[in-house]
Amino acid sequence: MTVQATARILEGAPIAEEILARVRADVADFTQSQGHPPGLTVVVCGSSAPSMVYLDRILKACATVGIDGRMVHVTGDDPDTQSRELAAALRALSADDEVSGIIVQMPLPAGIGIKVVIDAIDPAKDIDGIHPLNAGRLRLGFEGFVPATAHATLEMLERSGVQIAGAEAVVVGRSPVVGMPVAFMLAKTGATVTVCHSRTRDIGAHTRQADIVVVAAGHPGLVTGAMLKPGAVVIDVGINVVDGHLVGDVDMASAREVAGAIAPVPGGVGPLTNALLLAHLARAAQRQAAERSAVTARGTE
Ligand code: NAP
């Protein structure tokens, strides 16, 4: 009799609940000590249906933990006007003590460069780690805000008891928001990391050697069971809609017969990403309040 191996499914929701319970407590402490809840503002340029669904979900999550979540729309008629309005909105939010964190919905509309955001957002409120100061801190191993999806990937591995130090890890995708931050975090934690991308000649040759495979390419079915080492841990980060269904980048049917554990789409890193974004917000709020107290104390010396 042959027994088919079936991968353990790594679910994000239970871990997200644990994180949110802690956020709820931190937010309650902050609100009591500061007299107002921490604020998160999402800034949206133009309007596209998928991103609005995602943003609505974040705002609803804010409400469940006591964060004052708001949305600001930038509605100018042309890219120049939108760029000016976006910069003005980000400067105003950066200067507002009741706003602890800012997220700018990506991608920006055509004609608006990321530099507009970088020049206007306060890095201390950049809770999704898009500012070069936060990216540089991550690169150099200092404390800062890392993109929530990359953080969710590491959190999923660590909380699932996966041994990262000493592991061979392959990351498929090299974007500044997912692939590269994941690669830096894995390397910092002690994995030996290979980064694959659209110019990699034979992705399977790399993934078949890997104990940990993270796939963040946006290409459904990119990684199959035949490309995995038996027992490997697979984190699927891709988000694709195929025939009206949400799927990741990993071919689940074949991968789960070979892998030891898989974080699937949906249900894997997605729920964790939102919870960690709110955890970043709570941390930003605490730091800013501590900074304000320190300034006040210096002023009264
Ligand atoms: P991105 O900026 O488009 O980057 C995709 C990366 O994958 C690039 O490095 C690209 O290579 C590589 N790639 C694309 N097709 C490939 C292929 N056929 N073979 C090998 N490499 C390939 O996307 P992203 O923002 O990093 O997002 C990646 C995926 O994660 C998307 O599906 C996105 O929706 C999803 N995502 C999920 C979450 C979440 O919370 N779960 C959050 C953010 C993003 P090149 O660099 O050579 O072009």
Image: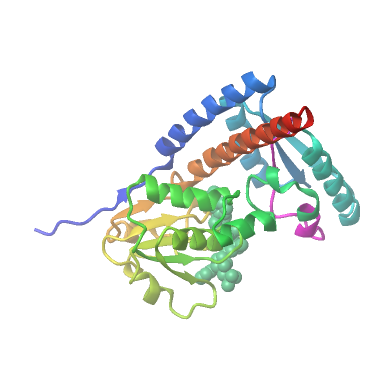
Q: Residue furthest front?
A: 301
**In the shown orientation, is residue 255 left or right of residue 117?**
left
Q: How many marks?
A: 0
Q: Quadrant of ligand 1?
A: bottom right
| In the foreground, 243 or 21 | 21
Q: How is the image coloured?
A: rainbow
The image quarter containing residue 59 is top right
Magenta residues span 98-117
Q: For this rendering, which residue is in front, 273 or 49?
A: 273
Inspect the magenta stretch and tell me whether residue 73 lies in it.
no
Q: Residue at x 49, y 58 (%)?
A: 185
Q: Position of residue 149 (x, y in %)?
A: 54, 50
- Residue 95 or residue 104, whichever sits in front: 95
Q: Residue at x 57, y 54 (%)?
A: 142
130 left or right, relative to 198:
right
Determine whether, in the image, residue 181 is placed left or right of residue 81.
Answer: left
Q: What secondary structure characterizes most of the magenta part?
A: loop
In the picture, which quadrant includes the C terminus? top right
Considering every residue shown, the one lying at the far bottom of the view is 201
Coordinates of residue 68 in the picture (x, y in percent):
68, 27
For the N terminus, which image quadrant? Answer: bottom left
Q: Is residue 101 magenta?
A: yes
Q: Is residue 222 visible?
A: no
Residue 201 seen in render: yes
Report x, y in % for residue 135.
63, 58
In the rendered image, residue 154, in percent from the top left (x then y), is placed at 45, 52
